[in-house]
Image: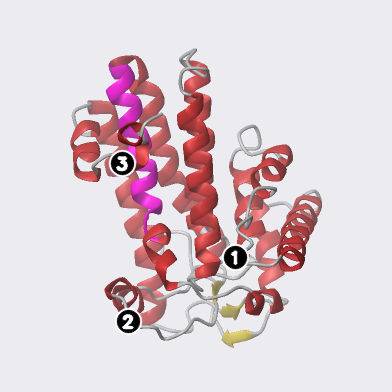
Amino acid sequence: MTKKEHIADRSVLFSVFKLLQYKKIRKAGLFCAGTALRDFFGLQYKQRLLPGKAPVYGVDHPLDEQIPFIPEKVDIYLDFVYFWIRAAAFLMERYGTAAEEAVASFVEAMGRLYSFAAEVYRQGFSTTRRPRYFKKFRFIIIHTFDPHLMCIPSLHVMVVCRAYTNFRAIAEQLGAEDALAPYIDELKRGAQAITESILYVKQHSVNCIPAAFYALSAFDPALFTPEEMEAFSQELFMDASHINPETREALLCYIKTLYYDFMEQKNTEKDWSQVLVNFLETKPLLIPGTKKLAQNSI
């Protein structure tokens, strides 16, 4: 696969233009944009403007201190939305109307991810310590416009893992798994790079990764199984120039152990989100909440 054939090399603007040509995908895109505005940006900015509507917890972990701050990873970190848009557009360019229904469902599911994660955010926000770094313009944008209140579960991880697993499922549905195998691998590796980047740019804690994996398994148990979590996790943080082998082993052990703890706790809770709310309540309370946010408060 030559460089020009990589999904990552596709123009985002062209990809959006391609997707908007299809009625079902336009409808799904409007739904996705609406839920992101309501359940991601709306919730955070309401909390910032009216602090105390819901509790805010600090979710840092001692292992975070063993992970270096690498500002150069910010471009990877910020690519998470473009990541799935390019993947969806690639399928439409390759398969056209034969893939329209499946890709529309792909896009619609991205919107549902925001609402699903918000079931936790509405009961408790979470944040981490992050360096006040302003030497790159993109960090200025992050510190200016990101309230940094939705760490658990990490939507970055949820979105990119959903993207590569859904892409693979669509390939199977189209009978094109072999033909698309290099692209499935590219997307998986891209999802792993973005997952790593959330720690390298200090926008999340290691706690946020297993929380996201657990949320994905609750969202679609068939698409993100424990086996999928294992296969995805075992290839994380392999660059020894950034993290030494001992730290990597500790990270992966912690991620997997906490994921399975969450999965076990789910068996005794009526609602999946309560497992993560219970976890948040074990963390330092930074801002007390006056009440839980009503489901339709935004």
Q: Position of residue 97 (x, y in %)?
A: 29, 16
Looking at the picture, tell me which residue is in the foreground, 133 or 51: 133
Residue 180 against residue 122 in the figure, above or below: above
**For discs 1 and 3, the disc positioned in front in the rendered view:** 1
Q: Position of residue 200 (x, y in %)?
A: 52, 69
On the image, numbered disc 2 is attached to which residue? 135
Which dot marks residue 293?
none
Q: For the magenta stretch, what is the residue range?
A: 78-96
Q: Main secondary structure of the magenta part?
A: helix
On the image, numbered disc 3 is attached to which residue? 9
Q: Secondary structure at mark 2?
A: loop
- Residue 63 location, quadrant: bottom right
Mark sitting earlier along the chain (1/3): 3
Q: What's under tag 2, amino acid-wise?
A: Lys
- Residue displayed at 45% across by 52% down: 114
Q: Are marks 1 and 3 in contact (CB under 8 Å)?
A: no
- Residue displayed at 78% across by 59% down: 253
The answer to whether residue 298 is seen in the rendering is no
- Residue displayed at 42% across by 72% down: 71
Mark sitting earlier along the chain (2/1): 2
Q: CA distance from mark 3 to mark 2?
A: 26 Å
Q: How many marks?
A: 3
Q: What's under tag 3, amino acid-wise?
A: Asp
- Residue 40 location, quadrant: bottom left
Residue 63 against residue 155 in the figure, above or below: below
Q: What's under tag 1, amino acid-wise?
A: Ser
Q: Position of residue 289 (x, y in %)?
A: 55, 81
Query: Is residue 125 shown in magenta?
Result: no
Query: Is residue 81 shown in magenta?
Result: yes
On the image, numbered disc 1 is attached to which residue? 241
The answer to whether residue 278 is seen in the rendering is yes
Q: Secondary structure at mark 3?
A: helix
